[in-house]
């Protein structure tokens, strides 16, 4: 049987990752189903976590850093009274204590843990020390000192009360380990705790609601699967927009600096050419528009733009192979 030919497909898929599968496994499965040549994701979810995993294909991978740096939201289920070696349900039990916590005491602790704070990354994480992931050292029984990192807990609220396994909503900055937050909640309560379950519900401005499961994706034909892709510029939709005429578009596509005209100064703007074709990102400063990241272009074609002017993965060539994350367990959870 002849293997399907991978295409230079461009776009973003909002995937609802299942439990028990690594982010890279989910990425490769979706990549095969879409027959896409180049792919990457925008922030690892542990196998023990489910929920929103935005996947980028083709030129959209050039903008994946925008979601890597974005705030994220989770629904987390804690297990009070039990601490583990990994601060989640995968680790070995370290200690069990009786639990006698009421909702008022629990919510008082949540209130104290909101806002800016320093968080020490766990040993069971993919952060590296002298080229070795910390989780490898942890599995060898080695513990090393880790520098605390600034994070922000924007929201920390009780969703469902259970005296042993309460559920909370966590809205946090990039780099936050929800496992460490669960551990901190348990320590503040005096009974200990670990993370029993986690579901990501938002990454930046993307929400879980419209996300598709791998099962639902597999049930569609190729055309139906590709129709679910969001435009590559979905990841930068919050940036100011600058539109160029045809001559200026050609110069910008070759990296030339342009007069900004009436465009307002901005650290980054998204730039479009004639027909609503995404050209890339630029900095608008001191009256000039300077390219920061360009999207590979074909010759203009009227069918390459959608009715609303956004590119939909057509008319863009595969131009850059980006890293696919093969990191194992335990990153930002």
Image (tube, rainbow, N blue to C red):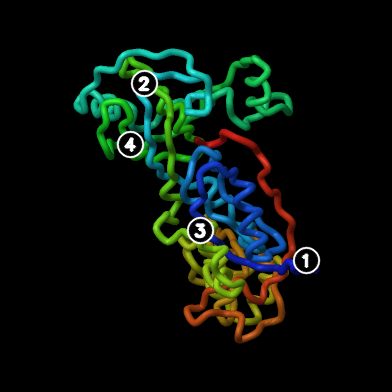
The disc, 3 or 2, on the residue closer to the chain's N-terminal end is: 3
Q: Residue at x 63, y 61 (%)?
A: 57
Cα–Cα gap, marks 3 and 2: 33 Å
Relative image position of residue 247 (x, y in whole percent): 65, 81
Relative image position of residue 183 (x, y in whole percent): 42, 23
Cα–Cα gap, marks 2 and 1: 51 Å
Residue in front for this viewpoint, 210 or 205:
210
Q: Is residue 270 visible?
A: no
The disc, 3 or 1, on the residue closer to the chain's N-terminal end is: 1
* Residue most extreme to the front: 1
Are the residues flagged by discs 2 and 4 in contact, CB closer than 8 Å? no
131 to 96, vertically: above or below: below
The nearer-to-camera label among 2 and 1 is 1
Relative image position of residue 217 (x, y in whole percent): 54, 63
Residue of label 1:
3
The disc, 4 or 3, on the residue closer to the chain's N-terminal end is: 3
Q: Quadrant of the N terminus?
A: bottom right
The disc, 2 or 1, on the residue closer to the chain's N-terminal end is: 1
Residue of label 4:
168
The secondary element bearing badge 3 is classed as strand
Relative image position of residue 200 (x, y in whole percent): 44, 45
């Amino acid at each position: 049987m002849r293997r399907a030919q991978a295409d230079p497909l461009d776009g973003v898929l909002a995937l609802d990752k299942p439990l028990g599968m690594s982010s890279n496994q989910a990425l490769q499965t979706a990549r095969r189903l879409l027959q896409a040549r180049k792919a990457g994701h925008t922030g690892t979810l542990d196998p023990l976590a489910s929920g929103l995993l935005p996947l980028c294909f083709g030129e959209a991978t050039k903008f994946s850093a925008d979601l890597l740096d974005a705030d994220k939201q989770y629904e987390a289920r804690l297990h009070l009274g039990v601490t583990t070696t990994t601060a989640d349900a995968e680790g070995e039990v370290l200690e069990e204590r009786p639990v006698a916590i009421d909702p008022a005491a629990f919510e008082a602790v949540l209130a104290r843990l909101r806002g800016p704070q320093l968080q020490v990354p766990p040993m069971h994480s993919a952060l590296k020390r002298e080229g070795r992931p910390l989780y490898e050292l942890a599995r060898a029984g080695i513990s090393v000192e880790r520098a605390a990192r600034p994070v922000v807990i924007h929201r920390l609220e009780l969703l469902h009360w259970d005296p042993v396994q309460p559920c909370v909503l966590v809205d946090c900055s990039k780099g936050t380990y929800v496992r460490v937050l669960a551990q901190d909640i348990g320590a503040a309560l005096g009974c200990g705790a670990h993370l029993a379950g986690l579901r990501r519900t938002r990454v930046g401005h993307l929400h879980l609601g419209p996300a598709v499961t791998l099962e639902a994706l597999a049930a569609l034909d190729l055309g139906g699967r590709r129709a679910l892709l969001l435009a590559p510029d979905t990841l930068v939709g919050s940036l100011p927009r600058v539109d160029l005429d045809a001559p200026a578009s050609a110069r910008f596509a070759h990296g030339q600096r342009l007069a900004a005209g009436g465009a307002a100064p901005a650290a980054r703007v998204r730039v479009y050419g004639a027909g609503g074709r995404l050209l890339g990102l630029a900095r608008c400063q001191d009256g000039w528009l300077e390219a920061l990241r360009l999207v590979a272009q074909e010759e203009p074609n009227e069918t390459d733009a959608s009715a609303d002017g956004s590119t939909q993965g057509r008319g863009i060539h595969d131009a850059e192979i980006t890293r696919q994350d093969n990191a194992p367990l335990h990153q930002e959870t």
